[in-house]
Amino acid sequence: DEILGFIGLNGDYIEGIFVCGEAQSRGIGKALLDHVKERKKKLSLNVYKKNRRAVSFYQRECFRIGEEGTDENTGESEYLMIWES
């Protein structure tokens, strides 16, 4: 009866997956992602290159690095990651 996470979706672009700190590493992010994958044929998202845990998570979930760039707002190096069914 408690919300432990949510996924923000804008068309086929994942704006973010957020999971409550104490609920992380319990499969909630994967469940949210699987829910969206059942409804979309293609998804993309940006993730900071230095966020290795997130990059690894998305790669395990069959996302590939589409391109490398820089977040204009923060100057951080980032990847555009893409998943296709």
Image (cartoon, grey):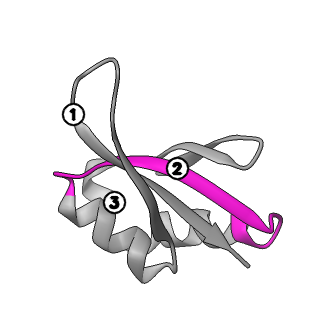
Which residue is drawn at the image coordinates 43% and 55% (left, top)? Answer: 67
On the rendered structure, is 3 left or right of 56? right
| Residue plotted at (16% across, 51% down) | 50
Q: Is residue 25 visible?
A: no
| Position of 25 relative to 36 (above/below) | below
In the displayed structure, does residue 49 sit left or right of residue 1? left
Q: Nearer the viewer, mark 3 or mark 1?
A: 1
Q: Is residue 34 magenta?
A: no
Q: Residue at x 31, y 61 (%)?
A: 54
Pointers 2 and 3 in contact (C-beta within 8 Å): no
Q: Earlier in the sequence, mark 1 or mark 2?
A: 2
Task: Say if 3 sits above or below 28 in the image.
Answer: above
- Residue picked out by circle 1: 76
Which mark lies nearer to you, 2 or 3? 2
Q: Which residues are magenta?
A: 36-51
The kind of residue tagged 1 is Glu
Q: Residues within 10 Å of mark 3 (few under 14, many from 20)?
A: few
User: Along the line of sight, which residue is nearer the eye, 42 or 5?
Assistant: 42
Q: Position of residue 5 (x, y in %)?
A: 49, 50
Residue carrying label 3:
23
Specify the amino acid type for callout 2. Answer: Leu
Residue 45 is tagged as 2
Mark 2–mark 3 Cα distance, whole angstroms, equals 22 Å
Which sits earlier in the primary sequence, circle 2 or circle 3?
3
Badge 2: how crowded within 10 Å, few (<14), some, or many (20+)? some
Secondary structure of the residue carrying numbered label 2: strand
Q: Name the residue furthest top.
A: 73
Query: Percent from the top left, x then y, of residue 29?
Result: 47, 64
Q: Dividing the image into 4 quarters, which one contains the C terminus?
A: bottom right
